[in-house]
Amino acid sequence: MRQTELTIKNTEITKDSLRNNLTMCPNARIGFRIAILQEVINKEEIKTISDRHNFSRSQIYKLVERVNKYGLEGLLDDPHTGRKQRITIDQKEELLLALSQKPIKKGYAQAEWDGPLLVKYMNDVFNLEYSVRQAQRLMKSLGYNVR
């Protein structure tokens, strides 16, 4: 098996810069990457790093390649755009107001909001078709308990 030298060439990546970023790291994934890079800087064998962190050697090489190219920004994930929301900000605000009131005040027979009722409400008011599960996620994202 061919062994390629694993070296961090970007001058922005040092033990101190990684340590400073570890204390301010927004999530565990980035902390995990920082730990791997610290071991690379300490010249540990790639197999040891791979086994210790259950991270493939190719992933470690890609990580080192990214930080060499982009510096500390290489630790971050690329944005995941996903599907655009169908509900607008104005509709969300209106929905927040509706959820703060009992459904009875909106003309529904139920005493509390739940996923199926929210689906019906959004279809009636905004002409949006959501699945029950997606409506429950929306309720939760707006800070309401899902029933």
Image (cartoon, rainbow, N blue to C red):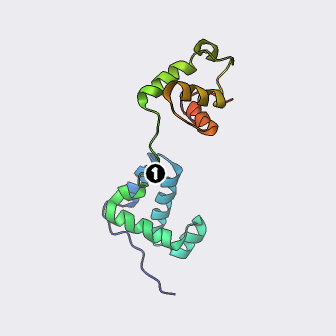
Q: Residue shown at 57%/21% (left/top)?
A: 99
- Drawn side of residue 129 relative to residue 5, left or right: right
* Residue 11: % across, % down: 30, 63
Which residue carries the number 1 mark? 22
81 on left or right of 95: left
Identify the residue at the far bottom of this view.
Answer: 1
Q: Specify whether residue 42 is in view.
A: no
Looking at the image, the residue that sits furthest to the top is 105
Give the residue at x 64% y 31%: 115
Question: Which residue is found at the position 44% from the left and 65% from the top?
Answer: 63
User: Residue 134's x, y, as percent?
Assistant: 59, 38
Q: Position of residue 29 (x, y in %)?
A: 51, 54
The one nearer the camera, 6 or 142, is: 142
Whether residue 49 can be seen here: yes
Q: Quadrant of the C terminus?
A: top right
Count of picture labels:
1
Query: Foreground residue, 71 or 95?
Result: 95
Few, some or many C-alpha atoms within 10 Å of disc 1 (few <14, some 14-19, many ≥20)?
A: some
Residue 145 picture location, percent across and down:
64, 28
Q: Secondary structure at mark 1?
A: helix
Residue 52 or residue 99, whichever sits in front: 99
- Find the residue positioned furthest to the left: 11
Classify residue 66 by image quadrant.
bottom left
Residue 140 drawn above or below residue 5: above
Q: Amino acid at mark 1?
A: Leu
Q: Is residue 102 above or below residue 39?
A: above
